[in-house]
């Protein structure tokens, strides 16, 4: 307890709390805006750093991770949040799996989990301080470098998405290896999800104690599951994390933190209902992808949970007028949806976006999300 308060007191005071207010359900004067993958390959200053450092070297070196996190904040005064530079795949690494980032292929895990026997290969009782302490250091450093400009978001991958990478050995189009686990080995799949979830929770708690002011759990492959599989496998593992995080924080006298769940593509009405009550799920905010209409989602989730999203990432290729038209159109809809709204893309920003188009997008969100 004392340690957390000491750390918190050492940071400059927060000057922009729009994100934190929207995450508590406030209909803010305008929508706070940030963009998934906002530190990334569309920024020339990011590519410059990547010339001389491998991807995981960037994640594992606190000064580099902090520099990369601050790059979009320094460039765009209109961003309302920062997200720590790291990757969801540091959890499989902490569990003992090798993860490579290949320039053309993305992540590769050379020794995937083939069957339940392979669960024995995973490290037991992962000590996140020891395995992933670099992330906590990066967070503390970044809070200082932010000078209170905007809040800092910590994150992790959701158990199902991480299990998918660990069983597929990388990305996949069909998810046949990971999904066949769910059919062949349902019990062991749940065991694996639980092992992952425990590391996720510890990692999120560590991030909060290091200075993260909000959290997001990325379930990027939730949409590959049937609604039944989502409810049976992904959902229990995801809410295990949020409840564990919140109960540990409560135990140590922490004032609490908002958590967002981005379950991409998990868009069936029954799934939205399942995620509608933060008291049940532990998730204050749901991230929406671009395939859904915010007002329709509101009908399914009601008004207890806040929403984040959901501009189509390709709007950033739409040119100035196209971006403005679309931000105006969708903002009008969002303003009719009740509760907190955090503006974001419906998935990460892609590498070929022109940095000035990202800047224009942010300006348009500021202008058109204003409530009168
Ligand atoms: O959002 C941010 O700016 C913070 C940093 C961040 C990264 N990855 C940096 C990154 C975050 C939050 C992530 C999350 C992540 N990583 C997800 C969930 C979000 C999503 O996109 O669905 C997933 C699925 C991963 C796994 C991953 N990492 C993939 C599939 C790839 C390769 C494909 C790609 O988009 O590049 C990565 C690499 C990665 N992670 C890069 C960055 C900036 C680019 C790699 C490089 O620099 O060479």
Image (cartoon, helix red, strand yellow):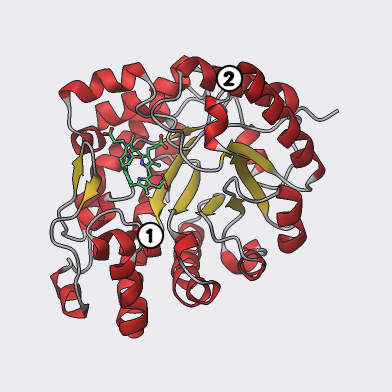
- Label 2: how many residues lie within 10 Å, few (<14), some (14-19) or many (20+)? few
Taking the image in four quarters, ligand 1 sits in the one at: top left
Q: Quadrant of residue 267?
A: bottom right
Please give the residue where the numbered disc 2 appears in the rendered image: 319
Label 2 CB sits under 8 Å from any ligand 1 atom: no
Looking at the image, residue 213 lies above or below residue 98? above
- Residue 256 seen in the current view: no
Please give the residue where the numbered disc 1 appears in the rendered image: 161
Label 1 CB sits under 8 Å from any ligand 1 atom: yes
- Residue 42 seen in the current view: yes
- What residue is rendered at 17% in x and 32% in y? 54
The quarter of the picture where the C terminus appears is top right
Q: Position of residue 137 (x, y in %)?
A: 29, 37
Q: Position of residue 204 (x, y in %)?
A: 40, 52
Residue nearest the observer in this picture, 140 or 56: 56
Element marked by disc 1: helix
- Label 1: how many residues lie within 10 Å, few (<14), some (14-19) or many (20+)? many
Q: Quadrant of residue 364?
A: top right
Asked whether the beta carbons under mark 1 and mark 2 sit within 8 Å of each other, the answer is no
Label disc, if present, on residue 169 of the rendered structure: none
Looking at the image, residue 138 lies above or below residue 91? above
- What residue is rendered at 48% in x and 47% in y? 215
């Amino acid at each position: 307890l004392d340690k957390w308060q000491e750390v918190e007191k050492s940071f400059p005071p927060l000057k922009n709390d729009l994100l934190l207010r929207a995450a508590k359900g406030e209909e803010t004067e305008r929508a706070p805006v940030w963009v998934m993958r906002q530190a990334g390959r569309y920024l020339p200053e990011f590519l410059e750093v990547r010339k001389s450092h491998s991807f995981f070297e960037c994640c594992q070196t606190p000064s580099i991770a902090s520099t990369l996190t601050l790059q979009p904040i320094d460039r765009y005064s209109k961003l309302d949040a920062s997200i720590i530079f790291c990757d969801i795949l540091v959890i499989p690494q902490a569990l003992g799996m090798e993860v490579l980032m290949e320039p053309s292929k993305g992540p590769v895990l050379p020794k995937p989990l083939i069957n339940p026997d392979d669960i024995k290969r995973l490290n037991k009782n992962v000590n996140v301080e020891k395995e992933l302490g670099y992330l906590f250091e990066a967070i503390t450093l970044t809070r200082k470098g932010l000078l209170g400009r905007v809040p800092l978001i910590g994150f992790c991958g959701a158990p199902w998405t991480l299990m998918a990478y660990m069983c597929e050995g990388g990305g996949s189009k069909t998810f046949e290896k990971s999904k066949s686990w769910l059919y062949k080995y349902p019990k062991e799949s749940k065991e694996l999800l639980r092992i992952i979830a425990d590391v996720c929770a510890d990692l999120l708690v560590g991030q909060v104690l290091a200075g993260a002011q909000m959290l997001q759990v990325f379930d990027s492959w939730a949409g590959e599951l049937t609604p039944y599989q989502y409810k049976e496998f992904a959902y229990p593992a995801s809410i295990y994390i949020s409840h564990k995080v919140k109960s540990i924080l409560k135990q140590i006298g922490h004032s609490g933190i908002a958590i967002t769940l981005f379950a991409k593509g998990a868009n069936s009405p029954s799934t939205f209902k399942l995620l509608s009550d933060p008291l049940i799920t532990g998730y204050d905010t749901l991230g929406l992808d671009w395939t859904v209409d915010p007002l329709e989602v509101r009908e399914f989730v009601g008004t207890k949970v806040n929403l984040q999203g959901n501009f189509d990432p390709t709007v950033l290729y739409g040119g100035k007028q196209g971006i403005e038209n679309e931000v105006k159109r969708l903002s009008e809809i969002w303003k009719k949806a009740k509760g907190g709204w955090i503006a974001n893309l419906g998935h990460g920003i892609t590498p070929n976006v022109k940095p000035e188009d990202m800047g224009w997008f942010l300006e348009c969100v500021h202008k058109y999300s204003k409530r009168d």
